[in-house]
Amino acid sequence: MAARIYQHVKSNMQSGRARTDRWVLEFEPAEPKRADPLTGWAGSGDTREQVRLGFPTLDAARAYAESQGLDFHVVPAPERRLKLQAYADNFR
C-alpha cells in the first residue's frame, strides 16, 4: 500500500492560516476511477481513497506509516510567496 504525506496549504479563498501546520497521510489510489453506468459519476471500488489521517508533526506521520508498514513519500509544501501591494496601486 502506497501513501503520501503532505502539509495542508492555505487556499486562495482563505485569509488566515488556520490548520496549515497539520500533516495529512492519504492513500494513493489503487485502481483508476471509472464512470458509473447509471449516473455517469466517476468512482472506484477502492475505499482507502476516502481515508485521511491527520498528524500534528511530520515525524508523527512518518512514525505511523513505518509502524503500519506503508510505503510512503513526503510531498514538500510549496514555499509561501508574499505579494506586497499598496492600496494606492489600484488607482495608477
Image: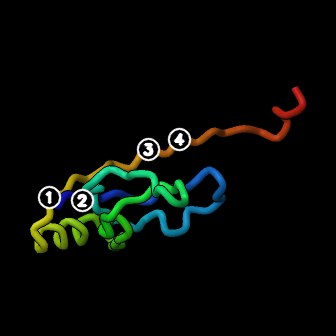
Which residue shows up at 55% across the image and 62% down it?
17
- Badge 4 density bin: few <14, some 14–19, many ≥20, Cα 10 Å: few
> What is the secondary structure assignment of the residue under circle 1?
strand
Tell me the crowding category of disc 2: few under 14, some 14 to 19, or many 20 or more residues within 10 angstroms, Cα based. Answer: some
The amino acid on which the numbered mark 4 sits, given as a three-letter code, is Arg
Q: Check the image and name the residue furthest to the right.
A: 91
How far across and down, in percent of the image, does residue 8 sit?
Answer: 44, 60
Residue drawn at (27%, 54%) of the image? 31
Residue type at mark 2: give it.
Answer: Ala
Lower sequence index among marks 1 and 3: 1
Q: CA distance from mark 3 to mark 2?
A: 22 Å
Q: Which residue is mark 2?
A: 3
Q: Does the CB distance between marks 2 and 1 fall below 8 Å?
A: yes
Q: Which residue is mark 4?
A: 81
Q: What SS does tag 3 mark?
A: loop
Looking at the rendered structure, the secondary structure element under dot 2 is strand
Of the pair 50 and 59, the residue shown nearer to us: 50
- Cβ–Cβ under 8 Å for marks 1 and 3: no
